[in-house]
Amino acid sequence: MSNSIKQRDILFNPLHEDENQAQTACEMLRDLEGILLAEALSPTHLVVRYELHLFTLEEIEELLAAVGFHLDNNLLIKLKRALYCYTEETERANLGCPKGQSNCTRVAYINRYQQLPHGCRDTRPDFWRDYL
């Protein structure tokens, strides 16, 4: 598995009107670009595999919470969540992906292209480019 592809477990609180939150969340996440796998292992346990340059665990969990799912919040889960969020944001920053920017791979290629010396540059001033 590539470094930019992550697989994480998401656990739900069993005290919710939807007794099968994992399956419901799985059906919702499967349609999103960047989610490679969403599988419900039990009514409260969801496994998600995603591309880091498009999603982070924090963004996925915020999306699920905003829709109305209740995530498990015991101490061990909170510690794991904080560690995953920190490491994923650090990895994205090292890849050139600022927080909240989902098209970081394209931006990284554009920045690299702009730094290379080549003959594909328009030497005219900006105000002259609008007249063609």
Image (tube, rainbow, N blue to C red):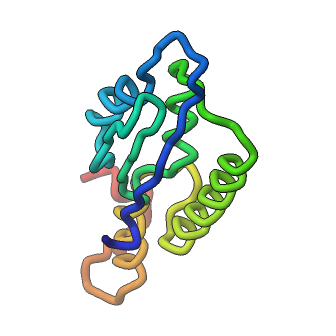
Image quadrant where residue 62 sits? top right
x, y (%) of residue 87? Answer: 60, 66
Taking the spot 52% from the left edge, 49% from the top edge, the residue there is 57
Compared to residue 8, the image places residue 111 above or below, namely below
- Quadrant of res 98: bottom right
Image height of 18 relative to 120, above or below: above
Q: Position of residue 102 (x, y in %)?
A: 44, 50
89 left or right, relative to 1: right
Residue 22's place in the image compared with 11, above or below, is: above
Residue lying at 57% horizontally and 46% vertically, measured from the top left: 58
Instruction: Examine the image and state in which quarter residue 112 appears.
Output: bottom left
Query: x and y percent of residue 6 in the render?
Result: 41, 60
Rendering coords of residue 41 (x, y %): 36, 40
Q: Along the horizontal axis of the image, is 82 left or right of 69?
A: right
Q: In the image, is residue 44 above or below residue 33?
A: above
Near-viewer residue (63 or 84): 84
Q: Nearer the viewer, residue 36 or 105?
A: 36
Q: Residue at x 51, y 32 (%)?
A: 63
Asked whether 84 or 88 is in front, the reply is 84
Q: How many marks?
A: 0
Residue in the image at 46% along x and 53% along y: 8
- Extreme residue in the top direction: 17
Quarter of the image with the N terminus in it: bottom left
| Residue 127 or residue 103, whichever sits in front | 103
Question: Which residue is at the far bottom?
Answer: 117
